[in-house]
Image (cartoon, rainbow, N blue to C red):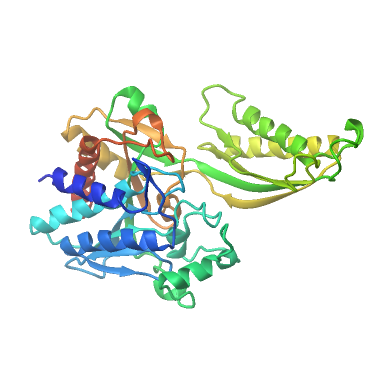
Amino acid sequence: MKINSARLEQYFEAMSLIGKIGETGTCRPAHTELEKQGFEIAGSWMKEAGMTVRIDNFGNLIGRLEGKNPDLPVLMMGSHLDSQPYGGRFDGVAGVLCAIEVVKTLHENGIVPERSIEVISFADEEGWRFNKGLFGSRGILGKLEEGELERADAAGITRGQALVAFGCDITKFKDSEYQPGSIFCFLELHIEQGPILDLANKPIGVVSGISGPLWWTVKLKGMAGHTGSVPMPIRKDALVGAAEIIVAVNEIANQVPGNPTVGTVGTLNIFPASRNIIPEEVTFTVDLRDIDLERRNRYEKQLRDRIEFICAKHKLTYEISEDTKSDPRYCADWIKEIIHAECQKLQLDEIELMSGPFHDALALSYVCDYGMIFVRCKDGISHNPLEYASYEDLAIGANVLLGTVQQILNR
């Protein structure tokens, strides 16, 4: 039994038109009309695959293929359909569409599983609109943090307002939460978003685990002044301090060649942002990740010490707000073994690798076993309109997912 590769390609082509930017780019923000359009078309494919479809109060799209014993914990799989503001066509989308195609294949072959299967497109995995990701996957587990509905986007719209406009009832989150023990396991297929598979010339990888992301928002405060009259030795230039910290992030993450540690400053906001005023306030984000928690904690302390030293040197004050802090999470050995076995059946010569980016699987890992399949990503480019995975590789990944699902259903 194999998936229908031509149909899967049609799914991708149709979804790529929603929120299309340029020739190959995508902008499909969370909790927007564009995401809803994506939900509508994906929901129609779910129905064709024999699933009942709903959108819960967190804004998750959920398709359910009822099993013979609906009281058993569900086999859940999926990813997300929201995109980066300047993103590609495959990030997240691959996990949702391949999962739909797997269920469609089972349904066409008259297979009614013992336990129910759910395919989910989780709301706001990306996290850029409200500066906090994995919203839908954390939501169904009752893991939202205080103040999340008050987070506002660049236009001043809060998440709560966006959810209400999306049709969700934010007073009934409890109705959309999953009870402990109700999820048997979670599977997520995803493009690698890195170059390892492409460099190894292999279409598929088996994920060993997800590195733990540490996200900060750092605010430095100095003193504004006229650029033409304030002498250099007495300045309190917040941007100079920020520049040195940015270099420090790079140096700390890079101190041991070959380690998978990564560190990034991705946003930078300057006040008052005038060419002839010394910057008084700078706010920037820090993203530090590692699969080794002990090493990441050590690097975190190094960075905190460097920030304290740099700010003292430039007579600045600083605040560090912790937005996300997750431990590395490892895939279940028994699921990895199944995925490896399915790859070998297809003679893929797969490799095992870790995931630097986080995924919805990270949230699910705290309540159930999980496994991930990576599909080759050309040149490792992602979060960019040039992001590319071939339909041939995606079909191979979907077939590995199909075989994995069948093996799990037989347990």
Question: Which residue sits furthest left?
Answer: 109
Q: How many marks?
A: 0
> Residue at (25%, 42%) from the top-left corner?
338
**Image spot of residue 102 (x, y percent):** 19, 51
Above or below — where is 57 with respect to 299? below
Q: Quadrant of residue 179?
A: bottom left
Regarding residue 211, the answer to whether it shows in the image is yes
Regarding residue 305, the answer to whether it shows in the image is no
- Left or right of residue 329, residue 232 in this image: right
Q: Quadrant of residue 277?
A: top right
**Image spot of residue 224 (x, y percent):** 84, 45
Of residue 324 and residue 382, the one placed in the foreground of this image is 382
Question: Which residue sits furthest bottom?
Answer: 171
Of residue 189 and residue 282, the one placed in the foreground of this image is 282
**Image spot of residue 271 (x, y percent):** 74, 48
Of residue 142 and residue 288, the one placed in the foreground of this image is 288
> Residue at (45%, 48%) from the top-left corner?
84
**Image spot of residue 226 (x, y percent):** 86, 41
Above or below — where is 201 with respect to 79? above
Of residue 127 and residue 156, the one placed in the foreground of this image is 156
- Left or right of residue 59, residue 337 in this image: left
- Left or right of residue 166, residue 102 in this image: left
- Left or right of residue 13, residue 130 in this image: right
